[in-house]
Image (tube, helix red, strand yellow):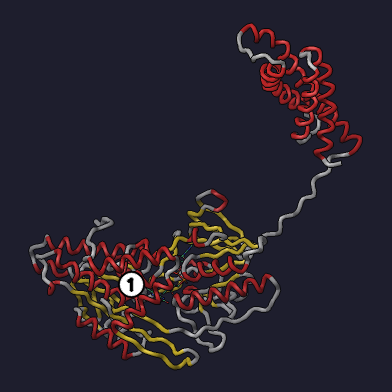
Amino acid sequence: MHRLTRRALIGTIAGALAGVALLSSTVHSAWCVLIGILVGAAYAAANRPARYAYVDNLMAASALGLPIWGLVSVIAIPLLTGQTPQWGAHQMRTHFPALMGWVLYGALLGLLTQAFADLAERLFGPELEEEVVAPPTKKRIVILGGGFAGMKTAECLEEQFRTDPSVAITLVNETNALLFTPMLAEVAGSSLEPSHISTPLRSSLPRTEFIRGTAVAVDFENRRVRLTGGAANGAPGNSDIRYDQLVLALGSVSNYLGMANVERLAFNFKTLLDAIRIRNRVIEMFERADAEPDSLKRRPLLTFVIAGGGFAGVELAGALNDFARGILADYPRLQPQDLKVILVHARDVILPELSESLGRYAQKRMEARGVIFRLNARLSDVSPGVVMLSDGDVQADTLVWTAGTAPNPLLKLLPLERDKRGAVIVEKTLAVKGHPGVWALGDCAAVLDSETGKPCPPTAQFALREAVRLARNIQAQLEGRPLKGFHFDSLGALCVVGHQTACAELTVPFVRSKSMRFSGLLAWAMWRGIYLGKLPGIERKIRVLMDWTAELFFPRDVVQTIDLK
Ligand SMILES: Cc1cc2nc3c(=O)[nH]c(=O)nc-3n(C[C@H](O)[C@H](O)[C@H](O)COP(=O)(O)OP(=O)(O)OC[C@H]3O[C@@H](n4cnc5c(N)ncnc54)[C@H](O)[C@@H]3O)c2cc1C
């Protein structure tokens, strides 16, 4: 018999007996016995029986007597017999026997229900449990890092496992947004609002559990990740999360090549906060220089050194130069010749990622706008007010370091095979060697192209394509299908070198060795079009487009948003 039917039957018998015994004598109404039967059936059906719980049942069902008395004896019966319910002291005295009747009825109902339930269990055995449909075993895929690689992996997994509830996806990241690094220089140069180049991870990945936290250790044996600042299981603080498949997408950090003073004194240029700090630093230096009457002391305040002539350094130098020269108008006491933006590069041509001719073009255009180049020079040390280069010191209060990156230092703490940069060595399928169910991609992984055998560069372009392959390989592994190697032909590279000027080198489709080069306004328009298209989220695209439009009509903003003192 179904458990609810059995309970209702028990309640009906108990309710009938209690009703006849107590209600018929005290409440004097056949209606009340009927109601007693119904209440008994409902009471018993709603309560899962526990063995010998007489006291619990006695108390619970007695308490039920009070509201039923109010509803039935005080309100319903007078209404049914054409009278108006009365609440006065006199009427209450009249209703008192009924109250006692209902409370006693409840007590007896509780006792009888329990007694019949115990008897039924003895005679017929325990209630039949409903057939429980076992929830499908959840396979948990945990992704560490919500940058280009991590977010794209989660996005692809969401799509692939859209209709499969047996797979749970968890993404852990230090911040709650994806930073669109190609536009970071524009934030430092005050062209874009910081939050406009950050895409919120929670709303972008609806099927993924997002945890804002920092992974600090991985226990590969027990398949657990230790987090700090995470809120796994709803509790902030240190927590462990279990995984079946683990994706390492931890990115990279600045590598100061062992120069402790540089690490201590230089500005970093990797995160949104770095870009905000740099912008505020420029404004702060202008304010201080404006208040400084001594021209000798003013110069280091207005000298900004950027170490590293790769994409990040060149884009930053171009953006800062435009920004600083643009805001000079707000500081009439400062002279253009006081301002210096110096780019230090260890080779004789900047932008080694592009052809030499484009590197030289970029250098010429930037020089024409006032950027100073210190080529074939190495930064050796820094002290407050002095940047030491291999070909002579520079008096400067601001140094930004973009000259080296290294894979995330957490990887050093993990028992994984790494290359000399510190990146995790992976198979061509992006699986980590010797650790089944562990994968790595993006800047933190040493990936070899499965067709060319060449190392894949640490760029967003590659991280995004690796993510697509990795997500497919995870699915293939879970479904017992063969995995495929990662292959991608670079689409080319674009770099903005200053106001409405860029360099672009795009690969000719299907002809790997051939590329097309663009420069100047056309390349700049291509840069804006391509990266606006790649910026995730329509809302962010509109915001960035609005910032760019405002920039055409209004001067750069010199409001300091954080206090650097
Ligand atoms: C200024 C700048 C401009 C660039 N421009 C371009 C460009 O134009 N084109 C291009 O292709 N590439 C560009 N790059 C490179 C590109 O940003 C990287 O290659 C890309 O971000 C790598 O993606 P990733 O997911 O591996 O790492 P990231 O995007 O760095 O993501 C790593 C994520 O992991 C998180 N994380 C780190 N440690 C932990 C931890 N312990 N626990 C939890 N989370 C953690 C970080 O917060 C971060 O969100 C640029 C880089 C910079 C800095």
Residue extending farthest right:
123
- State whether residue 397 appears in this view: yes
Query: In this view of the protein, which residue sits in the foreground, 5 or 446?
Result: 5
Q: Residues within 10 Å of mark 1 (few under 14, many from 20)?
A: few
Which quadrant would residue 29 be assigned to in this image? top right
* Front residue of this view, candidates 72 and 516: 72
How many marks the image carries: the answer is 1
Q: Name the residue tied to disc 1.
A: 259
Q: Position of residue 135 (x, y in %)?
A: 71, 55
User: Where 446 sits versus 61, above or below?
Assistant: below
x and y, in percent, of residue 92 in the image: 65, 10
Q: Establish if 140 lies above or below 237.
A: below
Q: Residue at x 48, y 54 (%)?
A: 229
Quarter of the image for the C terminus: give it: bottom left
Residue 376 visible, this angle: no
Image quadrant in which you'd find residue 407: bottom left
Q: Judge by depth and name the residue closer to the eye, 483 or 296.
A: 483
Q: Could you tell me the amino acid type at mark 1? A: Met
Q: Nearer the viewer, residue 142 or 123?
A: 123
Q: Residue at x 32, y 88 (%)?
A: 358
On screen, residue 184 versus residue 239, left or right, reads left
Name the image quarter holding the N terminus. top right
* Location of residue 319 in the rendering, given as x and y in whole percent from the top left corner: 27, 73
Asked whether mark 1 and ligand 1 are closer than 8 Å, the reply comes as no
Q: Residue furthest top?
A: 90
Image coords of residue 53 (percent x, y): 77, 29
Is 218 on the left or on the right of 303, as rendered? right
Secondary structure of residue under mark 1: loop
Q: Residue furthest front?
A: 82
Left or right: where 338 falls relative to 456: left
Split into quadrants, the picture shows ligand 1 in the one at: bottom left
